[in-house]
Image (cartoon, coloured by chain):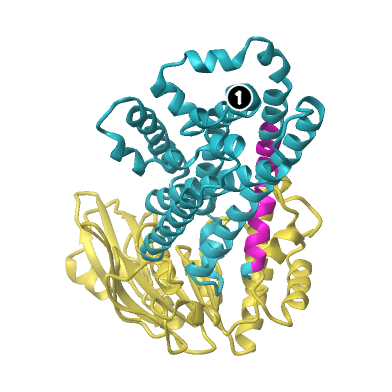
Chain colours: A yellow, B cyan
Amino acid sequence: MHALSKSFGDVHALRDLDLDVRPGEIFGFLGPNGAGKTTTIRLLLGLLRPTAVAAWILGFNAHTQGPRARRAVSCVPSEDALYDFMSVAAYLETVAPPGPSVQRRRAGLLERLDLDPDRRIKALSQGNRRKVALVAGLQADTPVYLLDEPTAALDPLIQQEFNRTMRDYRAEGRTVFMSTHVLSEAEALCDRVGILRAGSLVAVESVAELKRARVRRLVVRFVHPAPPDAAFRDARVARRNAHATRSRSRSQGPSTRRSRRSRSSTSRT
Amino acid sequence: MTRRLFWLTLRTRRTAILAFSAVMGLCALAVIGLWPTTKALNFAAYLEGLPPAVRALFLGDAFGNVEVERSAFFQYLGVEYATWAPMVMAYFGVWFGAGIVTRDFDRRTLLVLLALPVGRLRYLSARGAAVVVAAALVAAFTIVAFGVALSIWGGGEPRTLGDVALLHVQLWLFTLASGGLGALCGALLLEPGRAYGVAAALLAAMFLLSLVTRVIAGVEGLGYVSFFTYWRPAAQLVLGAFLWRDALVLIGVALVLFAAALAVFRRRDIAA
């Protein structure tokens, strides 16, 4: 993606997004709701027209060469967009892209995610509907996968299975671009993350760097008057809101670097 | 993939296709079944007593060209088919046409389908082909019902099933034009309720326009923008004349409207 931008009227959903996702990596796209994650994925899928420049998937322009670009891509949208009147198997067959290995991959995914293909979709729980959407997207044999908040509504066991599946895909050399607003999920699965805020990419870093630079918020309650500012600087406190008997602080660095200067304190990280 | 989309469209609308076929078939049975009663009421005399403009509305040119006594049955059918048949089929066309994009948009499956390696041209072509086939199925079922009813209640009348079939070809083309209008409204508005509403309102306006322009002198030219102007069943039923010009206009309108729907749809953001 190079200087990718998208506006809806006066609203800038995405501004000058420059991002390269490397082949064979799991890239996490982190950001709060409304940051522009889904907009980015829809631009990559050619569902939206970019306001400026464009995005390329394996050399194909996602907008002007949409069908060719999408031949290399499989997608799991954030919404569970399903045909309720179908069985799971019929739906998966309906949305399956062409390819010789699709049926074998589908069978493997159904088993891994513990999903019964004979059930009617309208009878499924929210979690099982999510599984159907996952299998529909992951059954394709493509080099690139675009996943929009894929694990929402999944129980922890299935999430673990999903993570294992994604690691298998990475081991096969496939590229996964995954949006999420759950930091722990990105930490557990991704090689690198991009952090999106209000339509702008504010950082791209490896998960190791992300953990090191993690910001912690501490609430420290002092029984006696708070220590001088120099003491907070020593403890790598980035910002401090001083109060007579209460100090809110934001510190940067590993969790072992917590300030021990309070004699009696409550803390929150 | 295109073929799969085509069958998916027919499959998701199969109940509606059956329902509309049943409605059209029952209407055909009811209209023809009522003929013996209507004949007893001297329908021919009733037609002769109508003001010329209203008579023209129902029968077009057909009334004045043949002897009333011989063709009263087909004039009766022409009057009936001039009103309810295009109403039902226009609604079917608008509903089906508008739904080819809006229903998937509404249930979010449009995201899934367009994320597949299918261009929007192929997507809309597959859906549009399903409209063509669905309208043909409804028309074919109506022909069968019509034939059954004719064999029961229309004995001895001179016209053949060939005229009935050609009449329904015209009705099919009329439905496709309505479907094109629905498809364009769907591509422009994306939301099903709004698309159905606007397309239906436009068709209602066309129907009123066709009435007004036939009754009020001096505004006849305006009637050409109405689809209903090109639906004149009496010509086929009474005179046995297939109106090629009307058929070509309806085909052209359908093609232009589907092409316009495609042009709009290709540029649309699928955002919601």
Which residues are the magenta region? B3-23
Judge left or right: residue B18 versus residue B202: right
Q: Position of residue A22 (x, y in %)?
A: 46, 89
Name the residue rendered at 26%, 33% in the picture: B219
- Residue at label 1? B76
Q: Quadrant of the C terminus of chain B?
A: bottom left
Q: Position of residue A92 (x, y in %)?
A: 70, 64
Instruction: Identify which residue, B173 or A11, lies in the foreground.
Output: B173
Q: Main secondary structure of the magenta part?
A: helix
Which quadrant would residue A95 be assigned to in this image? bottom right
Confirm whether the magenta stretch covers residue B12: yes
Q: Is residue A39 visible?
A: yes
Is A228 drawn above or below residue B56 in the view shown? below
Confirm whether the magenta stretch covers residue A27: no
Badge 1: residue crowd in 10 Å (few <14, some 14–19, many ≥20) = many
Q: Quadrant of the N terminus of chain B?
A: bottom right
Which quadrant would residue A66 be assigned to in this image? bottom left
Which quadrant would residue B130 be assigned to in this image? bottom right
Instruction: Identify which residue, B256 or A266, lies in the foreground.
Output: B256
Is A236 drawn above or below residue B68 in the view shown? below
Judge left or right: residue A85 versus residue B174: right
Q: What kind of residue is marked 1?
A: Tyr
